[in-house]
Amino acid sequence: MKRNLKVYAVWIVIAEAVGILSGLLSRGGMEVYSQTVTQPPLSPPMWLFPVVWGILYGLMGISAAMIWLSPESALRRRGLNLFVAQLVVNFFWSLIFFNLQAFGFAFIWLLLLWLLVAWMIVTFYQVKPLAAWLQVPYLLWLTFAGYLTYAVGILNR
């Protein structure tokens, strides 16, 4: 049991660290964004983003730990590889969107992220269904982020 808690802690820390580092590296871009970019209807206040992402990264870590603790299999390996891949793509999205303000490219990058997360969910479900269900809020948030990203691109041509 104690070993399992360590595994969960490690995966949560990994996921949260990726989010924190991405946020720190894009902080300046976020400030410029909030002051200069026309935002679409339904845009949440900026303070909400770190709250939501903190929860989502925590769920990512819990989910990845569940897969890690599952019996060795090709699906388990694929699920963990997809987890790492989506985490890397996720990391760079903030830099592309906020720092570069490359909104069109950020939308395409977000579509890639959405597809990776959907594939990860399907794979996780085959290994441990609860781990997959914990990722559904992430996919829903990415869907909403897709709307925001697309709309920002249209409003700020």
Image (cartoon, rainbow, N blue to C red):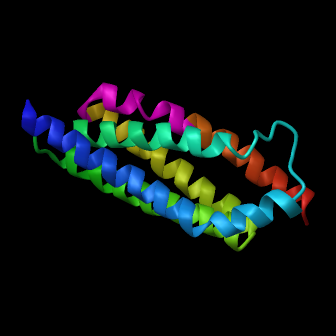
Q: Is any part of residue 79 visible from this angle?
A: no
- Residue 95 lies left or right of residue 107; in this view the side is left
What secondary structure is the stretch in magenta mostly built from? helix
Across and down, in percent, residue 99 comes to 68, 71
116 is higher (above) or lower (below) than 103: above
Across and down, in percent, residue 113 comes to 53, 54
Across and down, in percent, residue 55 comes to 48, 37
Residue 138 in the magenta stretch? The answer is yes
Residue 125 in the magenta stretch? The answer is no
Q: Residue at left 41%, top 30%? A: 134
Closer to the camera in the image, 30 or 93: 30
126 is higher (above) or lower (below) than 23: above
Assign the C terminus to one quadrant of the image: bottom right
Q: Residue at left 85%, top 60%? A: 35
- Residue 143 lies left or right of residue 6; in this view the side is right
Q: Is any part of residue 144 visible from this angle?
A: yes
Residue extent of the magenta highlight: 127-139
144 is higher (above) or lower (below) than 150: above
Q: Residue at left 87%, top 39%? A: 41
